[in-house]
Amino acid sequence: MMISEGDLDQLAEIELQKDEEEQEELGEGPAPPGGSSWQDTSHPFYDVAHHGILQVTGDDNYGRKLIIFSCCCLPPSHQLNHQRLLEYLKYTLDQYVESDYTVVYFHYGLRSTNKPSLRWLRDAYKEFDRKYKKNLKALYVVHPTNFIRVLWNIFKPLISHKFGKKLTYVNYLAELREHLNYEQLIIPPDVRRHDEKLRAAQKGGPPPPAKVPPPRPPLPTQQFGVSLQYIRDKNKGALIPPVMSQTVSYLKEKGLRTEGIFRRSARVQLIRDIQKLYNLGKPVDYEEYGDIHVPAVILKTFLRELPQPLLTFSLYERMQDIVRVETSLRVTKVKQMIESIPEHNYIVLKYLVCFLHMVSQESIINKMSPSNLACVFAVNLIWPAQGSVSLSALTPLNIFTEILIEHYHMVFSSRSPPGQVLP
């Protein structure tokens, strides 16, 4: 017997009500809509974006863009045009779907008062065609409930087996550490509190905190997770870290005309193995791997694992103001800001951006314009000292990085530290 859409909607509604009852038993009332730091009222989707439902926060451990959807930030349905929400989702994803990306879905906070209809969900799934699904590498559903499982059965006829394999249910936040850089995640406070109550409600109460062994001192040959100064001191004063010079040299020779260079990810175990080789001071031959995207991911990973970003923490807040600078004056402003960073950072940055400028010169073939490269590299060049890069902060970071790459010769024209090295 065929079940009507109305019956399915009613079944989902019953399960959602059960979820709400269970949350009340945990002492949780309706989660108030999460606020956001959005201040750009000129954003084309400000009416949706300011709720903070969607966040884009750097790359995951596999070099993929990380996109977060938080249900607890959804306002009551009468306060949000769900068609606008769908358009906003597509508008945001359109900036990233040409690259590999990961989605984290925080389910807590979805209630009968703010949930979209099943018809909307079905339309949304159809709207997100192959363009969006092809490069989605993983979908983590955090704090799933029976409502989610009912939805899955409803949509099963529409969902391909290949797409289904990308889904991972995550019962507790701690489990995300196995897959993602947990500290980089933007997790709403309501979700954190819900997770604490779920763990406390476990039989026997929450597990005791794991004992963390004291950090081991880095090896003299260490490349990843140590400062530029440390690498320089241990490599006879070399201004450019070996991992950077080797990946850039290889990519200059082999990868400038590779379509989508820096947009693809690589096998995580392979990347870890290569990191280990570098950290042990052993040689790395990229010819052995037969994949031009491997050195590209290694370069991004090296930048992302620096204890302090290449552009330094101090520049982060100042960089947010670039959107308020008149367009004709932005290159001069970027040049002034760049000249304020420490000399060693400046040398390494100039080396990197010179190479990225070369990549952009082949954009007709490799499809990596300064704008596309900025979307990839901005979050690997700078992040805040506390927390993660929010979606609202991403636009100025991308603009700043695009100017660096596109106007390389002007931005780096005057300051020439002694001993600088170019690719």
Image (cartoon, rainbow, N blue to C red):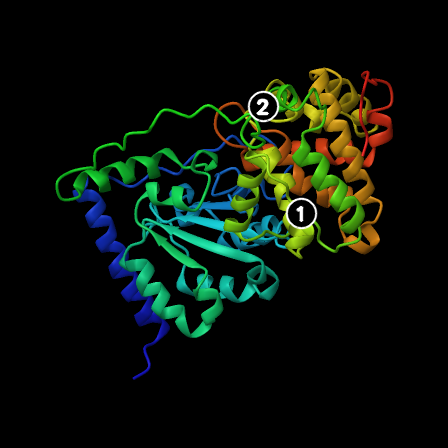
N-terminal-most mark, 1 or 2: 2
Residue 119 marker = none
Q: Which residue is mark 1?
A: 285
Q: Amino acid at mark 1?
A: Asp
Taking the spot 33% from the left edge, 36% from the top edge, the residue there is 192
Q: Position of residue 222 (x, y in %)?
A: 56, 30
Residue 227 marker = 2
Q: Position of residue 177 (x, y in %)?
A: 39, 41
Asked if the residue at tag 2 contacts the one at tag 1, i.e. Cβ–Cβ closer than 8 Å, the answer is no
Which of pointers 1 and 2 indicates the residue nearer the eye?
A: 1
* Above or below, 141 relative to 50: below
Instruction: Choose between 113 and 401: the one closer to the eye.
Output: 401
Judge the density around disc 1: few (<14), some (14-19), many (≥20) Cα neighbours within 10 Å: few
* Residue found farthest to the left: 204
Taking the spot 56% from the left edge, 37% from the top edge, the residue there is 391
Residue 194 located left or right of residue 310: left
Secondary structure beneath label 2: loop
* Above or below, 25 relative to 14: above
Taking the spot 53% from the left edge, 34% from the top edge, the residue there is 390
Q: CA distance from mark 1 to mark 2?
A: 24 Å
Secondary structure beneath label 1: loop
Q: Position of residue 131 (x, y in %)?
A: 62, 62
* Residue 325 falls in image quadrant: top right
* Residue found farthest to the front: 282
Quadrant of the frame with the N terminus: bottom left
Residue 125 located left or right of residue 289: left
Taking the spot 46% from the left edge, 62% from the top edge, the residue there is 120
Instruction: Choose between 140 and 231: the one closer to the eye.
Output: 231
